[in-house]
Image (tube, coloured by chain):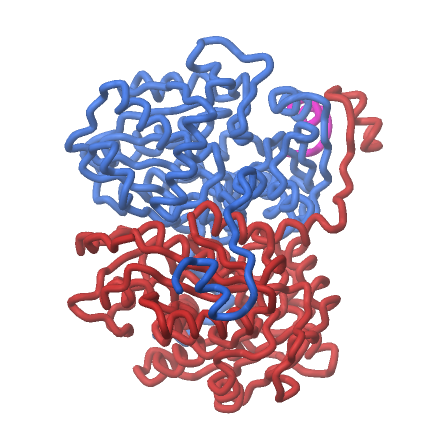
Chain colours: A blue, B red
Amino acid sequence: MTAETPPAALGDAPNRGVLLRFAEHLPITDATPMISLGEGDTPLVKSTHIVRDIGCDALYFKLESCNPTGSFKDRGMVVAVAKAMEAGATAIMCASTGNTSASAAAYAARYGLGVYVVVPDGKIARGKLAQSAVYGAEIIAIEGNFDAALRVAREITAKHPIALVNSVNPFRIEGQKTAAFEIADALGDAPDVLALPVGNAGNITAYWKGFIEYHHRERTSKRPRMLGFQAAGAAPLVHGAPVEHPHTLASAIRIGNPASWKTAIAARDESGGSIDAVTDDEILAAYNRLGREEGIFCEPASAAGVAGLLKLVAGGASFAGKTIVCIITGNGLKDPETALKTEPPIHHVAAELGAIEREMGWS
Amino acid sequence: MTAETPPAALGDAPNRGVLLRFAEHLPITDATPMISLGEGDTPLVKSTHIVRDIGCDALYFKLESCNPTGSFKDRGMVVAVAKAMEAGATAIMCASTGNTSASAAAYAARYGLGVYVVVPDGKIARGKLAQSAVYGAEIIAIEGNFDAALRVAREITAKHPIALVNSVNPFRIEGQKTAAFEIADALGDAPDVLALPVGNAGNITAYWKGFIEYHHRERTSKRPRMLGFQAAGAAPLVHGAPVEHPHTLASAIRIGNPASWKTAIAARDESGGSIDAVTDDEILAAYNRLGREEGIFCEPASAAGVAGLLKLVAGGASFAGKTIVCIITGNGLKDPETALKTEPPIHHVAAELGAIEREMGWS
């Protein structure tokens, strides 16, 4: 017991925080405010059912959905916002399909910054819109897709005194790489394979950077093969050319011209991995299996990793003997409409034992 | 449905898990399957703004919203489901305002159990309904409120071979008490005050049990005052009599006849605390302040603790020098409709620098 330690000395999240926990790996100075909203240190959970169909030794899910705003974005945002505050910024801006804006708005609210989020009009999942509204962001809904939103966000922040906190901001990648450290720490080594959805391609870039750094420091014996998966209607990295009108129900990866294109390709090639496409049907099937078989409710984009692994296995790939980690990037509650697209079977009945027994066939 | 072989004792969540982490404090036997969905070890986050109005030394929020299904229910559910599996159960049932059913359904999905959730028809927040649907629960929507749902769930499980996993199941309380341990571990001692919403009263019972046990083991120097808050339209513990038609927008605490009535009163009296009522307006004001000032998006019921503290301060109470922890019981994404009840101000504009500058008044 350390009751003599005054709580004031405990920092903004006494049992958490990407900045404090991974300070030695991050671009922190004496002037960096050690802010936190309790991000990072998310659960790593073993597959109970889907592992059998993948045929690997062990399959894990990294539940980035358990971050404070419900997605992996918080890890990078805390670094980007801290560095923006260090530089004297009083307002931040991002383009977003929804997760980035929710995260930016939460940290801005907490630390008294102005926040402007540029989103594709009418293309944001309802839960994510609710988040930005509650956190008090100024929402700029543009006629156009994510790529157009990022373009104007770059133009505005180049001209006005507002810090851009998209993943083109290198501090975002620095924070996001810490998830790789956590996975290696929990497993005792890097996994053989990392599978994840790819949209703007900042996350695959960040994981690969993290695994390389940990390997250099001899914290792991190996580096994983990086298997990225894009939605078939938004798969520029698979086709090798930007997609002008990206389309997929997985709104978080509905991106036609990824900002981190080159680094994603480098992660793929240096790791001996691949970036493949999965259809919306394959994504939805994996999304439903994650819920019904693993008890994991993720946003549709998050199911791309599982969908992709199942597709590779169906195509003849073998993962025998391998340890695989799939990244669950965001919480299913961010997109309740997809979950309720098929109205669930509900038994409407009187609050009476006999009535329920008859309805359920138990009498 | 058949229960499946319990998973290997290796651990279903390598960096997490209430059962493994707190085994010595829980009713675990050699036959208890050490299941996990990555529950527990949630962030404790310091207030940046509201602390000033409370006038205490430090104010923290325990983000139980970061649990795998988005509420504190996962802590108790993992113990209840493990003990049900140990006893050979192949199906579980609960009455629920939504959070308990989501949690029960997730663990049941993961471990191959049948799951029946009894809910008040039309009274479940949309996100919570989505969760039960995705996890594949059988949803029994009864004509009546939560109290009627719990009554029939008790009757059904008394007669049929289905395990009841409501908080009348003592294993639920055992699991939930572990949040008290985590708070004491993070702060180095128990806080002076614990503030939380009270509905069915299982949680205030569990926290008090946890703080008493840790104090007995000399892990803390003190025990907190327990300050519970009910919604004004559903405040049986404040009035001293059941409420036949409980009403509040905070659906998670819309309960008229709490199952853990006596233990909640004991927690109040033994701790020198209080159980008070807050209006829906006070709850909504606190809910909005948590979002806009702290970057915390919680479900409405979760704001009752902050609403109550602000009410007590307005009434003349002083918390000078105190360390206070408020429990954020559930994620705001579970109830996006409340968040979007006031349509957020959105700037609809062309994807063009000049147009945005004119719209925002920056030109």
Identify which residue is drawn at 25% across, 32% down: A54
The secondary structure making up most of the magenta span is: helix
Q: Quadrant of residue B19?
A: bottom left
Identify which residue is drawn at 78% across, 34% down: B347
Report the span colored magenta.
A154-163
Question: Is residue A156 a member of the stretch shown in magenta?
Answer: yes
Q: Which sits in the foreground, A271 or B82?
A: B82
Identify which residue is drawn at 53% across, 62% down: B119
Question: Is residue A335 a member of the stretch shown in magenta?
Answer: no
Where is residue A101 shown, x and y percent of the image?
Answer: 61, 38
Where is residue B337 shown, x and y percent of the image?
Answer: 67, 50
In which quadrant is the N terminus of chain A drawn? bottom left
Where is residue A78 shown, x and y percent of the image?
Answer: 52, 44
Q: Which sits in the foreground, B13 or A283?
A: A283
Q: Quadrant of residue B235?
A: bottom right
**Is residue B87 depicted above or below A219 in this figure?**
below
**Is residue A254 depicted above or below B262 in this figure?**
above
Q: Is residue A336 visible?
A: yes
Where is residue B35 shown, x and y percent of the image?
Answer: 27, 57
**Is residue B65 depicted above or below B272 in this figure?**
above
Q: Which sits in the foreground, A244 or B163?
A: B163
**Is residue A133 depicted above or below B236 in this figure?**
above
Q: Is residue B355 left or right of residue A1?
A: right
